[in-house]
Image: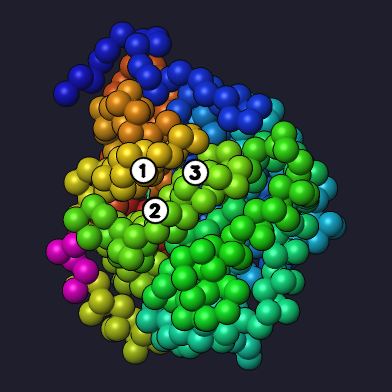
C-alpha cells in the first residue's frame, strides 16, 4: 500500500466543493454520530464543545452532528441533543462559534425518534410511529400517530430548522434514516397505513415532502438543506431491501442540496449501517438479563453477515448515480482505507465520503492523510462506541487489543 506519497494536493479527497454557497475545504465528512453529551434538556455541554473543536482541528471538511431532536417527545436517548426551544438557541450559538473558531464547518441533524426510543426515556408513554409496530430491539410496540400529531411534527421540524440557522450552523440535515420516525414512514415494512401518509411509495414519501417544504420555508433558498435517506431496512449483497431509490430522486426534485443515505434499522444495525460486532458485554446492568441474553443471541445470528471488508454501501451509491442522482452524494460505511476513500471520489461514485467510527477513534485522521501518512484507520468496527450509548455514556473509542473479540 502507498503509505508515504508526497504531501500536497495529489488527491481528489483534498479538493474543495461548494454546496448551495457552503464552501467545504475537502471531501472528508465526519459522519453523524450520536454523542450522548448533551444536558438532560438537550443543550450542549463543555464536553460536546471540546469533542467538536477537536474534530474540527482534525481536518474533516465537514462535521455532521448526531441525532438532535425537534421535540421533547421525539428524543430517542437520554443525553441526545435537542433544538426544540428558542431558549436553546444562544447555547447552540456559543457551540457553533467555538467550532468555527477551530476552523470547522458544522451541520445539525434534526430528527424524531419514532418507533426507536430508549424504553427508560418513554416510561409511562408509548413510542409513536407511522404504524403500530413491534420493535424487536427493545421488545415493545409503538403506537400509530394520528393526522393531527403528524401535522404537529411537520411544524416542529420547520421550527427546529429556523433555530438551527439562527444558532449559526452551516447547514441542516433532515434525518430520514436509521429506522427513526421518517425512515419508519418511508419503509413499506414499518408503514402499513393506507391514507395520505402511506399506502404506496408516493404517500410514504408525503411526510418527508411536507417537512422539507416547511424546513425550506424556515431557512430560505440560500441555506443548505441536506437529507439522510433510508434506502432500505436490510442489506442484501450490497443492495437495499425493500429498495427505496425512488425517494432519493424525489428528494433531488424537491431541492435537497446534498444526500447522505444509509440502509438498516436498529434491529439490523450491526449487519447494515453500523456493520461490525455486537458487544453486549459493554451494556451495564440497567438493562435486565432477559434483554441482554436476547441481544447476545441476535449477535450470534448476525455474526456471519457483520464483517467490515470494504465500503459496504458502494453498490447502492453507484445505483443512485446510475438512476440519475446528480446532487452531491455522501458515501459512508466501512471506509477505513485512504485508497477506498480516494477512489470513491475520484471515480465519481460519491462526491463526499463519510467516516464515523474511524474519526471517533482518531479525530486527526483526515489531517494525517492530508499530510501524507496514509496508513488505514485502526478502527476494527468493534461497535463498543455504539453499544455504550445504551448506557447513556458519552461517545468514545473503547478499543484496545484486549477488548477485541
Ligand atoms: C456510535 C455511533 C453512533 C451513530 N449515530 C448516528 C446518528 O446519530 N445519526 C446518524 O445518522 N447516523 C449515526 N450513526 C451511523 C454513522 O453515521 C455511519 O453511517 C456508520 O457508523 C457507518 O460509518 P463508519 O463505518 O464510518 O462508522 C452512528 C454510528 C455509530 C457507530
Return the residue at label 2: 245
Q: Is residue 241 above or below residue 173?
A: below
Kind of element beneath mark 3:
strand
Q: Mark 2 or mark 1, which is nearer the start of the sequence?
A: 2
Return the residue at label 3: 259
Q: Is residue 303 magenta?
A: yes
Residue at image x 34%, y 89%? 290
Q: Mark 3, residues whose alpha carbon is within 10 Å: few (<14), some, or many (≥20)?
A: many
Instruction: Determine the main secondary structure of the stretch shown in magenta.
Output: helix
Return the residue at label 1: 323
Q: Is residue 402 above or below residue 73?
A: above
In the image, the segment drawn in magenta is: 301-305
Q: What quarter of the picture does the N terminus occupy?
A: top left
Q: Position of residue 140 (x, y in %)?
A: 46, 87
Q: Mark 1, residues whose alpha carbon is within 10 Å: few (<14), some, or many (≥20)?
A: few
The answer to whether mark 1 is within 8 Å of ligand 1 is no
Q: Is residue 293 visible?
A: yes
Q: Position of residue 2 (x, y in %)?
A: 20, 19
- Nearest to viewer (mark 3 / mark 2): 2
Q: Position of residue 51 (x, y in %)?
A: 57, 43
Looking at the rendered structure, which numbered label has been put on residue 253? none
Q: Is residue 167 above or below residue 242?
A: above
Evaluate if marks 1 and 2 touch, with contact meaning CB atoms under 8 Å apart.
Answer: yes
Q: Is residue 294 left or right of residue 89?
A: left
Amino acid at each position: 500500500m502507498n503509505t508515504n506519497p508526497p504531501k500536497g494536493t495529489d488527491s481528489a479527497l483534498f479538493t474543495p466543493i461548494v454546496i448551495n454557497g457552503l464552501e467545504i475545504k475537502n471531501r472528508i465528512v465526519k459522519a453523524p454520530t450520536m454523542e450522548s453529551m448533551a444536558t438532560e434538556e438537550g443543550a450542549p455541554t463543555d464536553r460536546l464543545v471540546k469533542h467538536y473543536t477537536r474534530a474540527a482541528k482534525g481536518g474533516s471538511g465537514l462535521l455532521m452532528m448526531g441525532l438532535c431532536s425537534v421535540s421533547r417527545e421525539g428524543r430517542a436517548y437520554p443525553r441526545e441533543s435537542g433544538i426544540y426551544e428558542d431558549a436553546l438557541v444562544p447555547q447552540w450559538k456559543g457551540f457553533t462559534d467555538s467550532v468555527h473558531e477551530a476552523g470547522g464547518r458544522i451541520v445539525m441533524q434534526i430528527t424524531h425518534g419514532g418507533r426507536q426510543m430508549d424504553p427508560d426515556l418513554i416510561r409511562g408513554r408509548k413510542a409513536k410511529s407511522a404504524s403500530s409496530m413491534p420493535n424487536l430491539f427493545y421488545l415493545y410496540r409503538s403506537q400509530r400517530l394520528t393526522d393531527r400529531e403528524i401535522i404537529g411534527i411537520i411544524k416542529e421540524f420547520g421550527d427546529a430548522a429556523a433555530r438551527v440557522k439562527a444558532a449559526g450552523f452551516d447547514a441542516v440535515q433532515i434525518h430520514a434514516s436509521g429506522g427513526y420516525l421518517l425512515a419508519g414512514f418511508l419503509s413499506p415494512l414499518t408503514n402499513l397505513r393506507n391514507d395520505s401518509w402511506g399506502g404506496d411509495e408516493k404517500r410514504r414519501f408525503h411526510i418527508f415532502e411536507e417537512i422539507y417544504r416547511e424546513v425550506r420555508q424556515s431557512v430560505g433558498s440560500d441555506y443548505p438543506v441536506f437529507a439522510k435517506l433510508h434506502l432500505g431496512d436490510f442489506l442484501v449483497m450490497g443492495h437495499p431491501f425493500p429498495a427505496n431509490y425512488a425517494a432519493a430522486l424525489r428528494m433531488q426534485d424537491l431541492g435537497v442540496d446534498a444526500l447522505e443515505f444509509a440502509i438498516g434499522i436498529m434491529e439490523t444495525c450491526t449487519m447494515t449501517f453500523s456493520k461490525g460486532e455486537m458487544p453486549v458485554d459493554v451494556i451495564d446492568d440497567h438493562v435486565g438479563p432477559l434483554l441482554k441474553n436476547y441481544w447476545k443471541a441476535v449477535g450470534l445470528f448476525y455474526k456471519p453477515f457483520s464483517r467490515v471488508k470494504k465500503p459496504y454501501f458502494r453498490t447502492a451509491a453507484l445505483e443512485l448515480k446510475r438512476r440519475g442522482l446528480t446532487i452531491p452524494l455522501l458515501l459512508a460505511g466501512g471506509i477505513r482505507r485512504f485508497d477506498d476513500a480516494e477512489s470513491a471520489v475520484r471515480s465519481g461514485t460519491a462526491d463526499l465520503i463519510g467516516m464515523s467510527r474511524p474519526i471517533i477513534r482518531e479525530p486527526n485522521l483526515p489531517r494525517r492523510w492530508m499530510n501524507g501518512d496514509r496508513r488505514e484507520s485502526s478502527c476494527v468496527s468493534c461497535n463498543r462506541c455504539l453499544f455504550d450509548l445504551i448506557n447513556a455514556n458519552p461517545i468514545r473509542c473503547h478499543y484496545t487489543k484486549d477488548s477485541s473479540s
